Image (cartoon, rainbow, N blue to C red):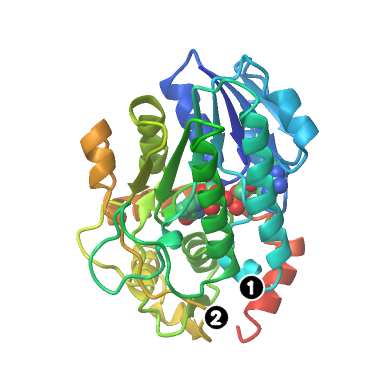
């Protein structure tokens, strides 16, 4: 198979490309990425010389470029590219509407002019909004309350993708709604890598509000396997949730404590800071449909995944240390003034 991946220098895209090239050695991958602040060229170190891999520096909103790339030789698009950080969406919503909505339409418009086997649109569990108990299923209604601009633009992209599956376009769209991912190559502004890198450097670990928010933590390799399963065994026109291997609710505070304990650091590093606006309290997903249709199940329990992730960051300082200076440092100081 010959696939076009968007946003393949970001966290999940990087892991997915590496996963696919290992598991499907005959496949070819074109990676279209704008290299925004979190699209890191270091993420494809070692791949540049792989003849199955091609990198294109560009913007998904550039319809001319996208249509040049979407030649009849491309079998499937896996669309990861997005602005993804909720905190940034609260101060720069226009970046989110541009990439997450206009960029998605640009891809779908180009996709309807070619014969793709599949267009995999990566959405998020945030489209369901928070749930107090139980787990959201694909048939559940989407968010009823106002959410942060990230969640709202992802929901718009998700619905637009669905509309291109319907008559008259029939783009063979499959939507994936993963829960919060964690693992190697995640930009250290996100909660888990921020907690790990700060703990490694004995710096305060910011935890929003009371820290009792719950996420359905999904190890990124399990997500990559789920996306591949949905591509190969799932159906166009369908939506699949992808949830993590968690036996019970884990709060952010508990996750931070596990990280600190694993590194034998002082729990007093955990510092409560003012809560984020529009902070959804709890997400939980049912992934029964994907299991029933493809056999996929998550394999990595949260605590094992956390240990693997901590070890990766411990061993890859050369990857994250350059990020935590410069623009990131400025953003961090602005974001966590109290620390
Ligand atoms: P990320 O922020 O790490 O990476 C995003 C990538 O997209 C970067 O490489 C960036 O350069 C690229 N990009 C941004 N705008 C672009 C544009 N206009 N044109 C081309 N490339 C552009 O994101 P991630 O965490 O890897 O998330 C990937 C996808 O998965 C996103 O669609 C996100 O909404 C979704 N998702 C993420 C999570 C999670 O926990 N990380 C959970 C559920 C869903």
Q: Is residue 21 above or below residue 282?
A: above
Badge number at residue 277: 2
Q: Is residue 256 above or below residue 181?
A: below
The front one of 60 and 245 is 60
The residue shown at (29%, 55%) is: 137
The residue shown at (36%, 37%) is: 226
The residue shown at (67%, 59%) is: 97
Measured as percent of width and height from the top left, residue 206 is found at 51, 77
Badge number at residue 90: 1
Q: Is residue 313 above or below residue 233?
A: below
Q: Is residue 269 above or below residue 322?
A: below
Measured as percent of width and height from the top left, residue 242 is found at 35, 47
Crowding at dot 1, Cα within 10 Å, few <14 / some 14-19 / many 20+, comes out as some
Can see residue 218? Answer: yes
Can see residue 299? Answer: no
Badge number at residue 112: none
The front one of 167 and 273 is 167
Q: Quadrant of the C terminus?
A: bottom right
* Label 2 CB less than 8 angstroms from ligand 1: no
When asked about the image quadrant of residue 298, the answer is: top left
When asked about the image quadrant of residue 221, the answer is: top left
Measured as percent of width and height from the top left, residue 160 is found at 56, 48
Distance (Cα) linking label 1 and label 2: 8 Å
Tell me which label, 1 or 2, sits earlier in the chain. Answer: 1
The front one of 124 and 189 is 124
Tell whether 333 sits left or right of 305. right
Give the SS element for disc 2: loop
Evaluate if marks 1 and 2 touch, with contact meaning CB atoms under 8 Å apart: yes
Give the SS element for disc 1: loop
């Amino acid at each position: 198979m010959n696939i076009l991946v968007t946003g393949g220098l970001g966290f999940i895209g990087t892991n997915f490309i590496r996963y696919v090239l290992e598991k499907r050695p005959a496949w070819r991958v074109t990676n279209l990425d704008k290299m925004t602040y979190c699209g890191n060229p270091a993420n494809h170190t070692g791949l540049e010389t792989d003849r199955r891999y091609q990198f294109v520096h560009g913007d998904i909103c550039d319809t001319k470029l996208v249509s040049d790339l979407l030649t009849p030789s491309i079998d499937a698009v896996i669309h990861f590219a997005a602005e993804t950080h909720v905190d940034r969406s609260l101060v720069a919503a226009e970046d989110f509407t541009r990439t997450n909505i206009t960029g998605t339409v640009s891809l779908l418009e180009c996709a309807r002019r070619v014969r793709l086997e599949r267009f995999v649109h990566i959405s998020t569990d945030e489209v369901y909004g928070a749930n107090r108990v139980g787990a959201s299923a694909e048939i559940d209604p989407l968010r009823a309350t106002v959410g942060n601009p990230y969640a709202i633009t992802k929901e718009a992209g998700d619905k637009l993708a669905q509309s291109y599956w319907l008559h008259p376009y029939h783009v063979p769209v499959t939507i994936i709604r993963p829960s919060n991912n964690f693992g190697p190559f995640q930009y250290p502004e996100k909660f888990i890598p921020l907690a790990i890198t700060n703990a490694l450097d004995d710096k305060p670990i910011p935890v929003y509000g009371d820290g009792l928010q719950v996420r359905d933590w999904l190890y990124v390799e399990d997500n990559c396997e789920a996306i591949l399963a949905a591509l190969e065994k799932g159906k166009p026109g369908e939506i699949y949730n992808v949830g993590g291997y968690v036996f019970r609710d884990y709060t952010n505070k508990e996750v931070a404590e596990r990280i600190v304990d694993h590194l034998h650091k002082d729990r007093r590093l955990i510092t409560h800071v003012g809560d984020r606006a529009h902070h959804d309290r709890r997400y939980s997903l049912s992934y029964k449909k994907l299991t029933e249709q493809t056999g996929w199940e998550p394999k990595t329990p949260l605590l094992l995944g956390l240990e693997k992730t901590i070890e990766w960051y411990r061993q890859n300082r050369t990857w994250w240390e350059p990020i935590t200076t410069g623009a990131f440092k400025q953003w961090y100081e602005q974001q966590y003034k109290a620390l």
